Every structure is written in structure tokens, then in C-alpha cells.
Image: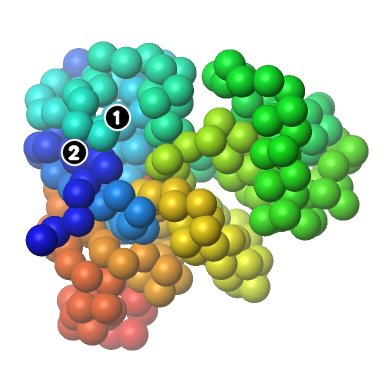
Amino acid sequence: APAEAILEVNNIEVIYDRVILVLKGVSLSVPRGGITALLGANGAGKTTTLKAISNLLHAERGEVTKGSIVFEGAEVQNLSPNDLVRRGCIQVMEGRHCFGHLSVEDNLLTGAFTRRDGQAAIRDDLEMVYNYFPRLKVRRNSQAGYTSGGEQQMTAIGRALMSRPKMILLDEPSMGLAPQLVEEIFEIVRKLNEEQGVSFLLAEQNTNVALRYAKYGYILESGRIVLDGEASALRENEDVKEFYLGVG
Ligand code: ATP
């Protein structure tokens, strides 16, 4: 039997500024405990898809005009982003979005804002985050804005972890990072998936690395899914090789 889906996106359409149709019927599903990649070139609509799920489109004058988004069996389109975080689904935005003037540790602590349990549990989770990202422990008192790009990406993921998510929507984690650091971050994603059971929807332009860590992938072109399949099959697919893996 197919694994239960933690997230289902059913045929969504997204329009910006009331007229610009950007997603033209996107459907995808992420199994509970899975790592699923959403692939495609710059401008294909990956970020728009993640923001539609997290309900972050309003600030950009975008709206979902068709379709449904179901997280753990419940329609979530009318939830605020914070309510969705409380239910266990959180987005890590592209470009990292740390609070540059706060310390790394204070950035992490801001990630616990939706929680109602006590300080002791939050401290425990801070240690859990440092356990996954030892570099952040070293840099805990540094102003986040002065840490490296890789450290800021780690801070952004660590901050999301502080909300105790069941699912993370991770936008373009490889962006602007050296290959070795990209591997380091993806290895941590894999560990979080295996050890904490966090499900991931991973938007990436770096098809090569994403298909090594994801189990399943969807390829988005101009607002439509044009191909999907097991990561191993996509890696062998001739079109994927030619257009996305740079092997053509
Ligand atoms: P990137 O790698 O740049 O994030 P992407 O695949 O995530 O690319 P989106 O950022 O979702 O793509 O953009 C998809 C399309 O929507 C692009 O053509 C973009 O110009 C358009 N778009 C994005 N945001 C807006 C907006 N606020 N208003 C109008 N059009 C927008």
C-alpha cells in the first residue's frame, strides 16, 4: 500500500496581482516521513508552490484561486501561517532570512514562538539543534548577520526545528553555498528525516544533489508539473539528464 500522505496539494492555481497566472494546476504529495524534491529552473514556480502551502502569498499579492491543500488530512488553506506552524508544518525561506542583528542563539530561540510548553523543553530542543549543527554551538553568541552563508542556512533550519515541526518546506537550501557545504546541509536533512521523522518538501534548482537525497521528485516547468517519479528513475531519465543534470 502507498505510504500515507502528510501533505497533499491538489490541482492548485495561483494568480499574482489578480491577473498573472503562475501555477496552472499543480498537484503533488509528500508521504509521511518522506523527502520529496520539487525541481525546476529559476522562475518555474517552486517558491510560489511552497508559499501557497504555507499561506504566505498574501504579502506578495498572490492568491490560490483553485484547488486544495491538505495537511494531515485537514484542509489548511484558510489557516494563518502561524496556525500551520502550530500544526507542525513550517517553511524555511529561500535566502535564509535570519535576524542579522540577533545572535545565532537568539535566532534559534525565536523559532520557539508558537510553543506553549515550558522553558526547559525549549532548552532541551536548543541542545538538540546544537547536536545536529555543532557549528552553531560554536557560533552561538555571534551576530547572525556576520556568520557565513552556510551558518546562516543552518541557523534558518535550526530555527524551524525549534517549532518541533513534523514537516519542513525547505526552499533552495543549496543556493550560494560551496558544494561541500551543500552536502553537509543535505546530510543533516537526511539525519533529521531518519532520526526525528521530519518530512521534507525540498525546492531545488540543484537537481543533481536533490535527487541523491530525495526519494521522489516532481519537475515543475512554467507552473505545471511535467514529470514525476522515484528519484532513482528520474536520475536515469534521458530528458532529466539532458535538461537538468547537465549531462546532455
Ligand atoms: P526561484 O528559483 O527564482 O525562486 P521559482 O521556481 O521558485 O524560482 P517563483 O519564484 O515561484 O519561481 O516564480 C514563478 C513565477 O512567478 C515567475 O515568473 C515570477 O516572475 C512570478 N512571480 C513571483 N512572485 C511574483 C509576484 N509577487 N508578483 C508577480 N509575479 C510573481
Residue that carries the numbered disc 1 in the rendered image? 52
Residue 66's x, y, as percent?
Answer: 10, 25
* Relative height, residue 238 to residue 22 (above, below): below
- Residue beneath the point at 44% across and 52% down: 197
**Kind of residue sitting beneath label 1:** Ala
Residue 218: % across, % down: 23, 58
**Residue 107 shows in the view:** no
Is the image coloured rainbow, by chain, by secondary structure, or in one colour?
rainbow
Between disc 2 and disc 1, the foreground one is 2
Q: Which mark is residue 9?
A: 2
Q: Is label 1 in a helix, a strand or a loop?
A: helix
The quarter of the picture where residue 142 lies is: top right
Q: Is residue 86 above or below residue 96?
A: above
Quarter placement of the C terminus: bottom left
Which quadrant does ligand 1 occupy?
Answer: top left
With 242 as the anchor, is 156 left or right in this view?
Answer: right
